[in-house]
Amino acid sequence: MDTNTTRQFVEETWNSSIIPTLTEYLAIPNQSPAYDPDWQTNGYLDQAVEVIANWVRGQDVPGLMLDIVRLEGRTPLLFIEIPGDSSETVLLYGHLDKQPPMDGWHEGLGPWKPIIKNGKLYGRGSADDGYAACASLTGIKALKRQDVACARCVIVIEACEESGSGDLPFYIDALADRIGTPSLVVCLDSGCGNYEQLWITTSLRGLVSGNLIVSTLTEGVHSGAASGIVPSTFRILRQLLNRLEDEKTGEIVPSAFKVEIPDERLQQAQITAQVMGQTVAGEFPFHPTTQAVTDNIHQLLLNRTWRPQLEITGASGLPSLEQAGNVLRPVTAVKISLRIPPMLDVDAAAAALKQLFEHDPSYGAQVSFEPEWGAAGWNAPPLAPWLERALNGASQEFFGKDVCAIGEGGTIPFMAMLGEKFPNAQFMITGVLGPHSNAHGPNEFLELSMGKRLTSCVARVLAEHFQAMCT
């Protein structure tokens, strides 16, 4: 594979067709089903699928087969198959469903208003992860145009990832014979520590999410009459949360939610801390006086990737400030989002969380915790020597720097599932979600030069995969 030819082809393809396609895609408000209960009737997911599918159809790749697969009652899935020069299979993955729009976009920007500014393409779903299908196929096409050998490739683009990928296992089972047994999995839905080199994800945290509800009364009563007699549901909620989290440090207290961090990951975090420096915390929009939980960068990385962390992502039973009267409220409910470490059993974690909250609440209050969904974390298998060389070579070739490893605090349920189904596969998990890209918040953007160079790196790794596995 010729470096300059690849770089030029990728640049031209992005500029002439990928960016216009992504611009069309970003204008569609195709939220993931968890956030859009009307997705089956409003047609937004179908529109997004058609935009990406039409781009794929226009690429004129010999032998390419494209199916829009629809299982009854489930989100659609793009299945793309490209014949190769051997029976070895590479599975490439991405998704096209989006997070909710969120408030707080800068003036002139918006979730469904794609704009290019300072080399960044703004809009919901740009970096997370609407570009994945285009980047994957362009990397493959770069090899085809140069007659560089490549294994058979299968691209799977789902429409349910932001809802926990609940539909995906059914598709993987239904398409098992067509997928085959991949020896390499490429996922473009992850993050990067900067935009200056190739980053490989070594681990992903899992997630347990659910509703914690505390109730003491059948209806609200006058707070002047009842306070001091009727226990506050808010206070009981605080007590229950303290069972889980140290309120002073944020540490998750019970050992049931922890694992021993492998030595290799500890060492990699040390190296990553040196590479990223203050950007680990500096990427977040802190108020001027607000500080990170520690100034130890190594510990910040471990907190984000291998230690459980709690966030309350929603609440009910609390009137708005404008509507808050002097009432002792009968119920307080919050949405629990507990990130759990890789290698921790998600079902056991959900059961432990339910037991922790519901056991012997103060004053005999009615307490329930109902898990909504959970996803297992993932720890990458050791890199095969050929893949380690290929990744570092690709990073040097297209970025001019060594590859760097990073654990991610987010969750990609597909990876844990694939790790179980294909235990002998190698994994290239990477992405463009870097500093300030803000995938789930306002002002999400795709750093375009990063997307282009990452596409070229995919091509290089696919070429090296063939040489290692098929010759």
Image (spheres, rainbow, N blue to C red):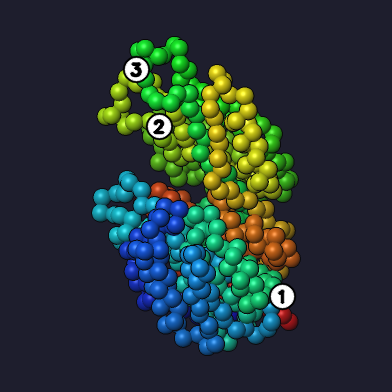
Give residue 317's mark. Answer: 2
Report the amino acid beneath label 2: Gly
Looking at the rendering, in which quadrant would you find the N terminus?
A: bottom right
Residue 308 drawn at (x, y percent): 61, 39
Q: Is 61 rendered above or below residue 344? A: below
The tag on residue 222 is 3
- Figure label count: 3
The residues tagged by marks 2 and 3 sit, at their Cα atoms, a distance apart of: 16 Å
Residue nearest the viewer, comparing 134 with 230 = 230
Give residue 149's position: percent from left, percent from top.
63, 83
Residue 327 vs 163, above or below: the answer is above
Mark 3 vs mark 1, foreground winner is: 3
The amino acid beneath tag 3 is His
Amino acid at circle 1:
Ala
Give the quadrant of the C terminus.
bottom right
Write down the residue under mark 1.
468
Residue neighbourhood size for the residue with mark 3, other residues' Cα within 10 Å, grouped as few (<14), some (14–19), many (≥20): few
**For marks 1 and 2 on the same chain, the one whose residue lies earlier in the sequence:** 2
Residue at image point 70% right, 65% down: 422
Displayed quadrant of residue 89:
bottom right
Q: Secondary structure at mark 3?
A: strand
